[in-house]
Amino acid sequence: MMRFNLRHHISAIIIVICVMPAGNSMLISHESEIQDSLICETIDFLSFNGSLANQSVHEQVDMGPRTPGSNGSHSLRMYLLDHLRGWDLTFQNHQYKELNITNVEAVYNSGMGNIVVLMAHYDTRQLADSVLSNNESPPDGANDGASGVAALLELGRIIPELRLNHEIRLVFTDAEDQGNLDESKNVTSIPWATGSQRWVENLSQTEIDGISSLIVLDMIGDKDLDFGKTIPANNTLWDITQRLAKLMGLVESETDCDGELGEPVFDISDVNYITDDHVPPHNVGIPVMDIIDIRYGSEEVLSGHWHTENDTIDKVSADSLEKVGKLVELGLRLGMWSGSNSTSNDSNSNSSLSSNDPISDTSIENEENTYRLMIGLFVFLFILISSLAGAWVIFAEKQGEV
């Protein structure tokens, strides 16, 4: 009996010593510690379906213009309600001049913290910036409007299957695209990203502090994708995006998981300041990133099909939607979006660009040093206790007690 009890007590101590470092590494891990091999393995399990997302683009365009306060706008909100069963939906109503604005927020894992917000605008412009002199109708908004919504809905379909341990919010903003309109043509012009601004104003400081990252998806369906780095933005979110895109084969002249050279889809060395739904959240200190293809149908920035009657469903690609959707899904599966609240915002942007994040790169380095120290301490204790236990067994056997 004595031998059994002694050795089992020793085994229990050794097990505790071995398990403790693993638990602490979970608490203080950082996205940079995720190995490329794990990312590559995870890519094989991604389930975002570009064809389903593209089908949603068609269904949205079939509703007609989704301008603020219109029948099409109402139909779109009912469409969201129908496609996000199992999510907690709220409709946030606002008035700006003559426009009725309604943001839609869908929440999953409410109250679990480390909030990740995925945002897209669902409104279409009241009046196309027409390439035809006699056209005064709204654009279809197939790419500029429907593509981002479609991606969020497809992510909303698969997120419950991911068993994430943090809160997710899908935010569908109204009135992003109603700026610089000619009011002589019986339309109402309001500031860009008004819906996003109203959404931010509804947040409590506790909610703001609890948001780890906010990612805007806008104009992501072009058959010829060309994403640069938009600012203002959070540097770490873009660094993560570039890393994931590289391994997915979406960065030119960089090798993917299979050793093949990638496509020219993401290039964060191409930096542009853009006013979009990410700006109001950025201005209150939320880590943001805007994934937007600002060269839609043209090499010129914000030209081509943008805001014109040529923004039609034939310009949108299921393959493009799937590339972007899978990248966002990959970050979710690996927990990389929920840990990005630990870095500073981009110092090169022009709108409230001071560091708003509570943990700097220096503190991340300190965490890593602390982790190494803890591992060393546990190894030392393991060796010490094992040696003492062995000595005790030898002593006990010599004394005839075992």
Image (tube, helix red, strand yellow):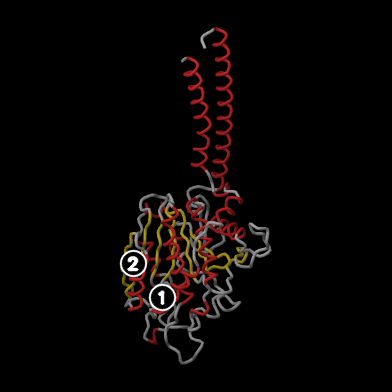
Q: Which residue is mark 1?
A: 60
Q: Amino acid at mark 1?
A: Gln
Separation of residues labelled 1 and 2 (CA atoms) = 14 Å
In the picture as drawn, the residue positioned furthest to the bottom comes out as: 134
Looking at the picture, tell me which residue is in the foreground, 38 or 30: 38
Is residue 230 shown left or right of residue 164? right
Quadrant of res 304: bottom right
Looking at the picture, tell me which residue is in the foreground, 82 or 294: 82
Between discs 1 and 2, the one toward the N terminus: 1
Looking at the picture, tell me which residue is in the foreground, 31 or 275: 31
* Vertical arrangement, residue 135 with respect to residue 28, above or below: below
Quadrant of res 270: bottom right
- In the image, which disc is placed on residue 156? none
Give me the residue at 40% from left, 81% from top.
126
Q: Which residue is mark 2?
A: 81
Q: Specify few, some or many for label 1: CA neighbours under 10 Å numbering under 14, 14-19, or 20 or more.
A: many
Q: Position of residue 131 (x, y in %)?
A: 51, 87
Q: Position of residue 165 (x, y in %)?
A: 43, 49
Q: Amino acid at mark 2?
A: Leu
- Which secondary structure, mark 2? helix
Give me the residue at 54% from left, 63% from top.
349
- Which secondary structure, mark 1? helix
In this rendering, the count of numbered labels is 2
